[in-house]
Amino acid sequence: MIHSEKQKHRGDEEVVKELCMVNGVSYEKISQEGSNISSLEIFFTGFPRMVGLSFFPRLCQLTIVGQNIKHIEGLECCPLLQELWVVQCHLTGISGLQNCLQLEKLYLYDNEISEITNLELQINLEVLWLNNNCITVIQGLNTLQNLKELNLADNIIEKIGHSLDHNASLENLNLSGNKISSFKELTLLARLPHLTELALKDPMSSPNPLCLLCNYATHVLYHMPGLQRLDTYDVSSKQVKEAAESTVMKKMMYYNMRVRSSQRALAETRFSLTERKKTLQQLPEECIRTLSHALKDLERELSRMLAGCKKSACIVEGDPGGSSHVVDGSASRRDPTTDVSHDPAVESKILFKMEALRERLVFWTRRLNKKAAPQILGTYLVLLFVTTSCTVIYHYRDLTKLNIFCYLPNRFTSCCDLLLSRFSPLDYKIHSITGIKVNRVIRIHNSALRLRFEDKLHSLLSSEDSVIISQNYRRRLEHLFYVADPEKTNEKEDILCILEDGFKTAQNYKVLLANFSLLIKCCNAEMLVLLPVGQIIVAKVFVGHSVPVKEGEPVDRSSYPKMYSVYRNVDTKERTAMSEGIRQWFVFDHELVLPEYIMYFEYIIEDQQQHAVSVRNTDRDETSSNNIIMDKEVLNMEPVLKSQPKLLSLDDKILLNVARANVLSQITVLNLHGNSLSKIKEISRLKALRHLTISFNEFTRLDDISHMPNLEFLDASFNHLVTLEGLRGLGQLKQFDVRWNKLTTAREDTAVLRKHMPSLLKLDTRYNTWNRPESVRMIILGHLTTLTHLDDVMVTEEEAAEAVQMAAGSKINQASLLAHSRTNSDHPRSLSLLSTAQFLTLCSNALNFGQITALNLDSQRISRLINLDKLVNLCWASFNDNDISRVEGLDNCLKLKELSLNNNNISSLSGYLNASLLEQLPNLCFLSVENNCINSLRGIQKVHSLHELYIANNQISTSRDIYYLKARVDKYHHFGSLWKSFITYAGKLSDLLWAVSYCDNSNEVTECESAKDMFGGRLTPDMVAEKLGHSNYTDMTHLTLQSCNIKMVDLSPAELFSSLRSVNLEHNNLTSFSGLIYLQNIKALCLNYNHIESILPRQKVYLTNRQMLYSKVHSSGYGQQSTSKTNREAGATASLEPLMSSLEVLHLSHNGISNMANLQLSRLTNLKALFLQGNEISQVEGLEGLHQLRELVLDRNRIKALAENSFVGQNALLELHLAENRIRELNHLDPLKELRKLFLGLNKLQVFTSSSSSLVMPLDILNVNFQIFNKNTYSDFQLHSLNGSHQSDFLR
């Protein structure tokens, strides 16, 4: 032992001598000179152990390179050490630095270190190099808050996580040559505020997998705008940063559109399912209504029977008599001798029939509720797809890493065939499953996982024999199935994790091949019957060398050291050719499993397959018919009551008649069931009334039922109530029935009941059209604490307490504000598709109201926006999934930039979000109000800073509202299908088309074209303002817009253009007057060189070949239209409503008009001048209604002759132009008694008939520029027709 110690001491002495020699220090004088040495270095050999350092107590720098040192030691006596290099020395760990508290630089690269430890005390460390080691996890750096440079290149690091969050001073980081594959990891580096240099693929190392992904540099530069160098390249220029930010914004826009398109598809599917549900419910609803009406008739009759023997009857309704208010005439009060109450057997018959009716009502009610099942199943299928695909896009930060393509099965037939070929129906026989149907296939392309799979496969194959590489490796590639176990995992989260990070180790995951009976074991039979649907991942797997699982041995790599995977043969009860070879696989290396597809399928149940048609048609029809027959049998049971005349209104006499009372004050029970009443103002005078029935009437409101202090029972079922507002002063009401109405807003209606019915015990609100039916019960119970029964179900104490607690938590208070708010001052740089408020509230809570910048109150059941006055710095707010009906309370939030109000009950953006409030939000750039009840966008034009508006799935129905968005929304809009097309064209085209180009490129080109076709060429107020340079519409008297490709006029509201007197729209593409007919003050209208066919757009008429030929070629020999037909058209035109009563001058030249009757010109009753030159008119007609016409120009047409009725209504015509036509005979001008000017130049006049030669018109000007004229007939014409003329113009 002593000998070995001596040998070691002698060896250490040699090491120290070597150290002194290479550093120029005399070993003999080391005790004197050692204390003055501050720097030592030794390279390659001669220093196997760190010894002798105690001789250098003032050592500040130590460099050891290329030695065989396993551990750091001997530094206990070097407290002043500031820089340490231990490089290429086979170090296996970090140790021995506990006394080096002044250490600033530590270089430990090119070693075998696997874990970062023992650096907690080095708080002054600024530089740390651990590159080229075996480190897998970044850890142990939390205390190094002064660290400025960190080199972890060429290790085996896959994730960064939050390991560097505490190193806020970090300026230079090198992570090249690692296994980082997710952009999500890089996003976390944005927390380092001083980071200026980052390397992930520097030239000295291999790149990380994520560096091979598209837009890698863009992603980094967007999240870390402070970087000056990336991968040794200079990225400090402003242009580089702006390009990165622009690219990311476009990408965000694309994914945002994808998500919202999927959500819109889901909403549309839900709507279609709702419509289908309504269709299925029509028969049950009709039957319930009929049976309920009969039941209430019997209840009324029974009530009258029981009270009929009482002398002071103020109870039931008799036949109304002697009143003009009764529809079916008057009737005297019922004769007691014929009253059914005198028959003792009738009461038992009524009771028996009522019981039978109630049984039928129970049956149809169950049938009605059962019809909701298809909606649940269909919605589940859609939700399964949308939540998966959308959440993948929305959840993952690395948007460029993961691409999702969703197709119907026909796009991936081979994938579907693979699933179907491996399905064995015999394994499902016990569950009555006979087949499987693929509904949807989603293609997954995860670039990082694919690169990892290919790299791993390449590395494995490179180590195999060349024969195996060339011949067998493809045989070892399989496509296997994986399905999540619903009993052990959250299926959605499981699927999402696999899509992003791939499969985990074999201990946690199994990839199932072929046998679907294995999948059934993962869910019970009841679940399979309830939801016979599922999803499965198809993965490409390299199984490599594989063997069967040995019984009794654990399935892990240690039991099968040379195997890549193992499998277990699955036994089936009835083995078939299909079931041969069914196996369950266990793949040890998760990097060799690549998810490629998600398939959504449903099982075909035996009953569905064999009886689908019969159940859907024959059986359903037979069952319905049988039930209807049973209903009729019940309705025809004795006694059958005679129908009663219906009341339309009430007066005192009718009330006394109906109630069988002598004075109004005696009436305590009144039954007005089954009438046609919509108002009952007289009812308020019945102060003693306790029981009121008004079912099966026409009420939309109950304003007349107020201030009735004794009323205890009110039945208003089966009406058309849309609100309960107006009810008041019913303090004693205990039972209220409002079933089968049209109530929508539970919270507002409940507030009315709470205020005016404090004693209410029983309330029935079933079968109304509530906006949020799933939350109605809790809302009502939370506000009406006196209720004992709701919807015919007893209210339990636990349920009432829960509802009250929920109602209390639905109000915005200090606690909720602090719990759901944040104080971040900067907009986060993140690719998350969450709103800013949603994203920021994932961090720590706020502490002060005045500092709150982000507020997220989603899904808090909030009904009003209150207590927000102190949030003066609020920038981002989200109130999604609440019950808000009014946008209010934001007056002091002047810095608000983003506001999200999706899934609420907002009906309008004006009135509540009024002009004054909008003007006080100068920074609002993002507004999302999807899935509300908004029917108008009026008021949105006040938000001048708005960049993004989302308003899909609302109730906007007029295009006028969309124009409010013009020049307000700069970047993009997203609406339903029609609105999206409209906005694509009607907004700022340069921005909108740019935005659309990133949204579903396969369809958007078509959408842009259809948008142009649908909405292009509209003359709108915005177009007027754009062309004229101002928007002073009310001061505008003349409007000229020539050659603007206008196809339609939509100058609404017309009140804006009340001062307009003349319009010139020459050289456009109008086919009708369109919206010009609403401009009532126009006097002159010029529409030359258009394509006018009629004043109003004409409906499409299908013509025969003969009619089409005649309409195109007037000289085709088929003759003119018959007089009878012309007369019919004239009569039809004359009966139409007059239009544009102020119009006096109309220009319609060169429009290609061939049929004057189709123009409907007779509707312009005040017209004084009409210009139709240069058309293709062959017959003068359709002028019957133009009695004020003074001037008519028909030059350059194709008129051959004038018909008898051409000028029947033009008694006031002064000037007629018929030049350059084809007139051969001049006749039928007799009605033109006041004609002063007649132009007939360049016609084919040959002979004047006797009728023409006898004209006595006092012409002032006659222009007869004819080609061939008979002098004899002309002189005769001149004598008679030019009597008193002052000028004759003969040009030729």
Image: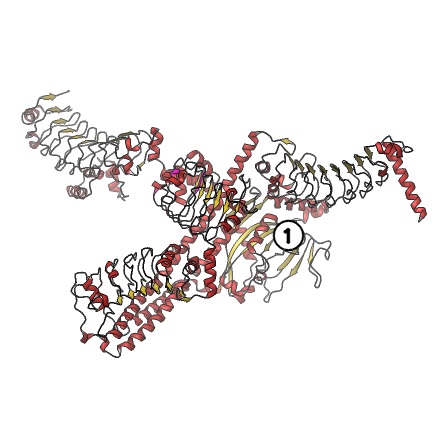
Query: Label 1 sits on what residue type?
Result: Lys
Q: Is residue 377 magenta?
A: no
Q: Position of residue 733 (x, y in %)?
A: 33, 64
Task: Tell me if residue 1283 comes above or below residue 306 in the rendering.
Answer: above
Q: Residue at x 61, y 61 (%)?
A: 580
Residue that lies at the very extreme toward the right in this rendered image: 3
Residue 943 or residue 498, whichever sits in front: 943
When the figure is inspected, residue 991 is found, relative to residue 266, above or below; the finding is above
Question: In which quadrant of the rendered view does residue 1014 lie?
Answer: top left
Quadrant location, the C terminus: top left
Observer able to see residue 85: yes
Give the labeled residue for mark 1.
504
SS for dot 1: loop
Q: Is residue 608 in view from this perspective? A: no
Q: Is residue 651 left or right of residue 23?
A: left
Q: Which residues are magenta?
A: 941-958
Q: How many marks?
A: 1
The colour scheme used to paint the residues is: secondary structure
Q: Judge from the rendering whether residue 917 lies leftward or rightward of residue 584; answer left or right.
A: left
Question: Residue 172 sits in which quadrant?
Answer: top right
| Residue 345 place in picture, x, y as percent | 26, 79
Q: Nearer the viewer, residue 927 or 1082?
A: 927
Q: Residue furthest bottom?
A: 344
Q: Is 1152 in front, or is 308? A: 308
Quadrant of residue 788 in the image?
bottom left
Q: Position of residue 995 (x, y in %)?
A: 46, 38
Q: Is residue 1257 left or right of residue 280?
A: left
Q: Is residue 546 above or below residue 824?
A: below
Dominant secondary structure, magenta: loop
Confirm whether the magenta stretch covers residue 957.
yes
Place of residue 473 in the rendered image (x, y in percent of width and height, measured from the top left): 67, 49
